[in-house]
Image: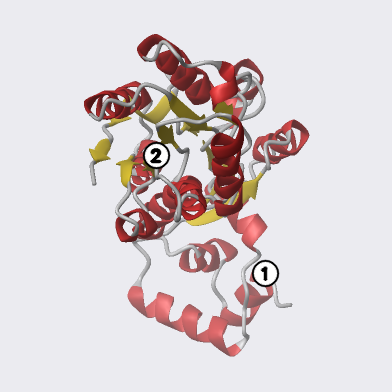
Amino acid sequence: MVTIREIAKLSGYSTTMISRVINNYPYVDEEKRREILKLLKELDYRPNSIARSLSIGKTYNIGVIVPYLNIAYFEQLVSGITEAAFHHHYKVTLLPTNYNPETELNYLEEFSTKLYDGLIITSKVNSLEKILEYQQYGPLIFCEYVPEEKIASVYIDREKAFMDVMAYFSEHNVKKIGITAGRNERYSDSTKLLLQLAEKNFETFEPADVVRNCLTYEDGYRAAQFFYEKNQVEGILANGDEISAGIYDFYRDKKLPLIVGQDNLLVSKLLNLSTIDYHMTKCGREAFLQFIENRNEKLMIESTFIKR
């Protein structure tokens, strides 16, 4: 492949001038720019992207650590991030972890080599202290509340959202509730918060009223079968609308408990099920804006409880 030095020799211009044209620097004589661009095209020149990134100090690539790519909550987050990144001419590299701590650390090591200009962490498995060791290599933006100063985080008010659901159950005289959760409360602050609120607001609530590791429609169906056969409940808060659809399907020809989902997917509207809209697309957009505008703010996105 032809090099900048060879192009300079053929054109009579300096390597500095050739580099300025390739990198679209301003204040280059237009006639010289046209001549050099014409020569680049004739020689089918392709710039070395790694060398170019080193020269300008940017990769125009942002990494997004995400546990799953097929869960609605994270799909919406990623959608918002990519929308904002596209507007700012940034490439998005998705870094799925499946909540494997070693995989997550490998991505952080990649970040330390300047492979990405920044990292958006939608959900983590390693400790915050461990992850913050990599802050020296560039901006880290979290899609959850981080109390430390000078750490950017965009988060949702889960406590208000959960309390809205508790009030909704009480309005309908629901005394005993069941809960489905994606992650164990030992590892998930949101699951831990939800169980604490359930214990506080419902005297009959106990650990047996929780079905964990629910991520899909099939998991929802399995959870509903458990509640129906082993632990009768009057209301169920599912951790996603796909899960609530599975619950609904199991109870289709039985007495239906009051079901509330999360994520505000089309299926909840079609099945006329209440849900929580966390506005995750907006959350993703705001996370990228924190990065591109070099902000370290704590930004809360308010949720909307949709009653049906």
42 left or right of 1? left
73 left or right of 126? left
Where in the figure is residue 213, as x and y percent of width and height? 63, 36
Q: Is residue 149 visible?
A: no
Q: To which residue does mark 2 refer?
A: 257
Q: Earlier in the sequence, mark 2 or mark 1?
A: 1
The mark closer to the camera, 2 or 1, is: 2
> Could you tell me if the residues under marks 2 and 1 are in contact, i.e. CB atoms within 8 Å?
no
Residue located 45% across and 33% down the image: 143
Which mark is on residue 152? none
Where in the figure is residue 23, as x and y percent of width and height? 49, 62
Mark 2, secondary structure of its residue: loop
Q: Is residue 111 above or below residue 11?
A: above
Extreme bottom residue here? 42
Q: Quadrant of residue 112?
A: top right
* Residue type at the position of mark 2: Pro
Residue located 40% across and 60% down the image: 86
Q: To which residue does mark 1 refer?
A: 5
Residue toward you, 186 or 269:
269
Residue located 42% across and 51% down the image: 76
Q: Is residue 120 visible?
A: yes
Residue toward you, 56 or 205:
205
Residue toward you, 199 or 107:
199
Badge 1 crowding class, 10 Å Cα cut-off, few under 14, some 14 to 19, many 20 or more, is some
Mark 1, secondary structure of its residue: helix
The residues bearing labels 2 and 1 have C-alpha atoms spaced at a distance of 74 Å
79 left or right of 126? left
Where in the figure is residue 123, as x and y percent of width and height? 55, 34
